Image (cartoon, rainbow, N blue to C red):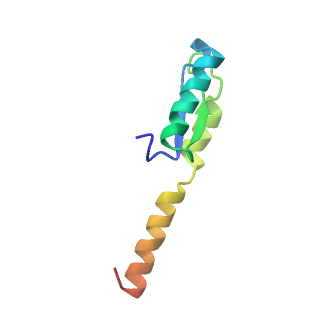
Amino acid sequence: QIREADVCFVNKIDAATPEEIAKTEQFIKGINEHCEIAHMSAETGEGISHACDLIENGTSPRYDDSVEAERLKNEYGGE
């Protein structure tokens, strides 16, 4: 899932050390260097509004490109 993700949410940041968070970020970026990383804590509420905004209003460049390619294929033919 990380490989295909546009955004990865790192939760429970209130229970992690800065080193653990950094290690998690490195792990994610090692799999998908273009993935945006959003930090949040359901316990404290930190980052929740940003996460909600990403979910509600975020766009997916890969999805948008795929939709556009399909539209062009349907409009002009081809494979």
**Furthest residue to the front?**
30
Quadrant for residue 44, please give it.
top right
- Residue 61, compared with residue 41, is above or below; it is below
**Furthest residue to the left?**
79
Q: Residue at x 44, y 47 (%)?
A: 4
Front residue (pair 53, 38): 38
- Residue 38, compared with residue 40, is above or below; it is below
User: Could you say where residue 58 lies in the image, as x and y percent from the top left?
Assistant: 58, 49
Count of all numbered marks drawn on residues in the image: 0
> In the image, 55: left or right of 72?
right
Quadrant for residue 53, please give it.
top right
Quadrant into which the N terminus falls: top left
**Furthest residue to the bottom?**
76
Q: Residue at x 44, y 73 (%)?
A: 69
User: Could you say where residue 60 lies in the image, as x and y percent from the top left?
Assistant: 53, 54
Q: Residue at x 62, y 14 (%)?
A: 17
User: Could you say where residue 9 lies in the image, as x and y percent from the top left?
Assistant: 53, 33
User: Could you say where residue 56 lies in the image, as x and y percent from the top left?
Assistant: 56, 45
- Residue 52, compared with residue 57, is above or below; it is above
Quadrant into which the C terminus falls: bottom left
Front residue (pair 45, 79): 79
> In the image, 40: left or right of 79?
right
- Residue 28, compared with residue 62, is above or below; it is above
Front residue (pair 27, 21): 27
